[in-house]
Each structure stands twice: as C-alpha cells, then as structure tokens.
Image: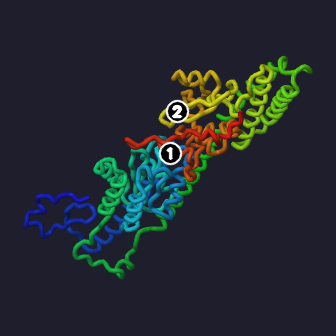
Amino acid sequence: MAVAPSAASRDPAVSGRLRRDGVTGLYCDPMPAAEARSWRVLRATSVAVAGSLTIAALALVGTAIPAAAGDRVDRAGAALRTNPLYLAPGAERLISPAQAAGISNRLGRAATPIFIAVLPVMAVKETGDDPGRLPGALYLANGQQAGTYAVWAGKSFRAGSTELGTIADQIAQDAKAASGGDRAEAILRFVEAVELELWQPPPPGSTVTTETHERSGGFPYAWLFALLGVLLIGVAGWARARIVRAEQQEFDVSRELLDHDLRTLDDEVQHAEATLTGPDLDAVLRADYARALGGLAQAKQKATALGGPEDVVEFAHTLDEIRYALACARARSEDRPLPIRPACLFDPLHPAPEREVLWTPDGAEPRLVPACADDADRLRAGAAPQARTVKDLDLRLPYWAAGASCRAWALGWYRTGYDSEQLYALFAGTPLGAALDDPAEPTQESPLDGWTEPEPGAAALPTQPDQRSTGVSR
C-alpha cells in the first residue's frame, strides 16, 4: 500500500539517490544489485510463508470451532476446487444469477487466486460464532490451496490470505463499507483491491536474469516444506480429535435424554396395567397395551447396547412405538378419538396430540406442528410451550436450540409420521433444523435453508407443510 514520499525525496538535491521500493511503497537508498536480488527472493518467500501461516492460524485459533458442525464450510471448500465462487442454496435472494455470473467471470480473470463463498449466517456456528475464522476454515476445507479467501455470512464479510495475511480482512471491511450493503458490489470491490495490493512493478534498471537466478544459492525450501508438512499433520490430528469429542458429546446428551424417557415410559406402562388389562376389555385395546409391554421389554434390552448415533435413532424410535401404543389403548378405554401419530413436538413424553397447531420459533417462519392440548392452549394464548430442555454449558435450553447434540434423538422420536423433508421443515430456522437440513438439497418446505437474516423488505416465504401431504395419520 503506497506511502507518500517524504519531503527529502522531493528535494532535487537528493532525489537522484533515492528510489521507490515497489512492495512497501517507501522511498529508500538503493542497494547493490546482488544484495537487492537476495532481498527480493527472501522478502517474497517470507510474505508467502507468513500469509500461509496467518490464514492457517485463522482456522486454528480458539477452541470454539465445532468440528462436527462443519458441513456447510466443507461443502463450500469442495465446491471452490472447481469454481472460485460458491453460493450456498438460498443465496440467490442476496446475489442475483446475473450478478453471480459477473463475479465468476471477474474471478476467472483475476491475476491472483481469489475464492469467494456466500454462506448462510448459520455457518458462523461452525466456527464458534466467530465469523473471522470462516476464511481460515474455508482455506482448510479447500485443501490448503494458496490464495485469498473471503466469506459473506449473514451481515459479515471477512477475509484472509496466504499472500496478504490479515491485510485482506481490512480490504474486505473497506469494500463492505464502500458498497453500502450491496454484497455483489462489495465482492467486486474486494477483488479489485486485492489485485492492486498484490501488483508489484519491476524495479527500475533491474538486471536480474534467469541465468543469475539459477546460480544463486536459493532459499532452503526443503526446510520450509518439512515445516508445512508437520503443520498439516498437526491440523489433521487436531480436527480428528475435535470430531471425536463432538461425537462423544452428542452421544452423552442423547444417552441422558433416553435414560429419562425410558424411566418415564416404564412408570406409565406399569401404572396403566390396572385399567388397561382384563378379559372384559376390548381385544384391540388389550392388543395396544400388549404392544406397549413388548416394546418396553425390547427397549430395556437395547439400553445396554447403545454404541453410536444409529443406535440412538433406533432406541428413540422404539420408545415412540411404546408411547403411541399406550396412547391408543388409553384413548380406546376412554372412548376418545385416536391421537395423531407423531408425538408432541415440544416434548415427546407429553400427552398424545390430537391436532396440529401453528408455532413460530424465534426468528423463523411459522409452521404447523403436533402439540399436546396444554401446549396448544399455551400457543393460542401467546405463551411459550412447555419444552423439553437440555443442559448446554451453564444454561438449560429447549432441545431444538442445542443443534446437532439432539439430532439423533429427534430423528428417532419424530421419524414416524413425517418424511425427511417435512421433518426438516418442522425445525427450520432453529439450530436443530440447521443440523438436520442438507444445504445441497433445498426443498419447498425449507426454502430459506438456514438463512435467518432476510433482506429488508423481503417477502416472507411460507414454510407451513401442505395439509394434504403431511404424512400424519389420524
């Protein structure tokens, strides 16, 4: 970045012995040709090494990057290997196809590798709620390919570079401020500024030739490559350790939920025996209760063999079968209509729901969900439902706010009655919805696909499931 020449450099008496260095923009005394060549090689290599370590550090700094929650960044990194511009599904609301084509064309003509990703704001969760770590994470996901990386996520525009280091982030902030919030314009300004920053004019009167370059001793590249190899091995081990810890955390949360569910259902089935058994009762009623007893015996056997997310899903599904069989037996004994198939969305152990009600999670769109009578009354009165909670650090949160930690548990409890797309739509706009959703497969039921910061004046997109295709049995 150029710096204005000093007063001395403008003095004719001394201007003849001062020249402008093309990299720093400073005016300095010329050095001998041989020394100048060595300096240029060392400076160029040092900038590249420092830039590489800087952007890698962006991904390594801090301990709050959830390794198991890197799906969006990983998909973006894989896509950038074939196209320098990646727009997550739903980004067309922010950048039109025509603007995207113009940006792709400009990136293809760039004099230096520049990679741009436009991601939903939920991607920030994958870097510990720190958007500044997204460029480094994208660099790792792209196979540590050298270049400059910039990421739009929600209202944040951050960048990092193996060529410029943290200077790239300042360029991104300047481009964002100058664009007035227009994402496409900010990206184009950013590309232009990066090229200008990296452009190096040849020094006047340079006598460096291929022959003299080949005769030079050179930089110890073998040592540099060995250092980078050790760094990559360390990054791979660190990432694997974080994945293992995240999987263990998800299993621990699910195991705690399932233990509570099994104890509660065991008590309910045993207490209902006096009223739901006997030769005078309806045969279908007794068959429902027998299914509940049989499922309970199966669940107790499975409880000792839980080993991973698949086991959690199957175990929770078995508990849901017990719950529904018991709810049907009770409805028949009281001469009431049978409940709908899915459990109450706010807590599967609540009384069986008889209908769906409208629910609007914080910051998301309204949708129809199955709810017990008490929760339905609360929602109609404008109150919050009585939700099942889990512990996250020092807080108790509704399970859908815990994200991937409750993914397998929710899949088991609610997989009957809804197909996968409708299940995503039930939790769209929540951390659990982001964990369940696949951004590579946008659906009509989940059009926002994790975007939670709509543009001002943008029309709300309905996400209510079609009553004719909810898959709910009544």
**Quadrant of residue 431 within the rendered picture:** top right
> Which is more toward the observer, 272 or 152?
272
- How far across and how far down the image is residue 86, in percent? 47, 57
Answer few, some or many: residues within 10 Å of disc 1's Cα (few below 14, many 20 plus, some between 14 and 19).
many
In the rendered image, the residue lying farthest to the front is 468
Residue for point 69% across, 24% down? 351
The earlier-in-sequence mark between 2 and 1 is: 2
Q: Nearer the viewer, residue 78 or 186?
A: 186
Q: Looking at the image, which residue is at 82% across and 34% down?
A: 298
- Circle 2: residue type: Pro
Residue drawn at (49%, 60%) of the image: 80
* Residue position for label 2: 361
Q: Amino acid at mark 1?
A: Leu
Location of mark 1 (residue): 448
Q: What element does badge 1 sit on? A: loop
Q: Is residue 182 above or below residue 358?
A: below
Assign the C terminus to one quadrant of the image. top right
The x, y position of residue 202, in whole percent, is 27, 72
How far from the left and from the top, in percent, is residue 198?
32, 63
At mark 2, the secondary structure is loop
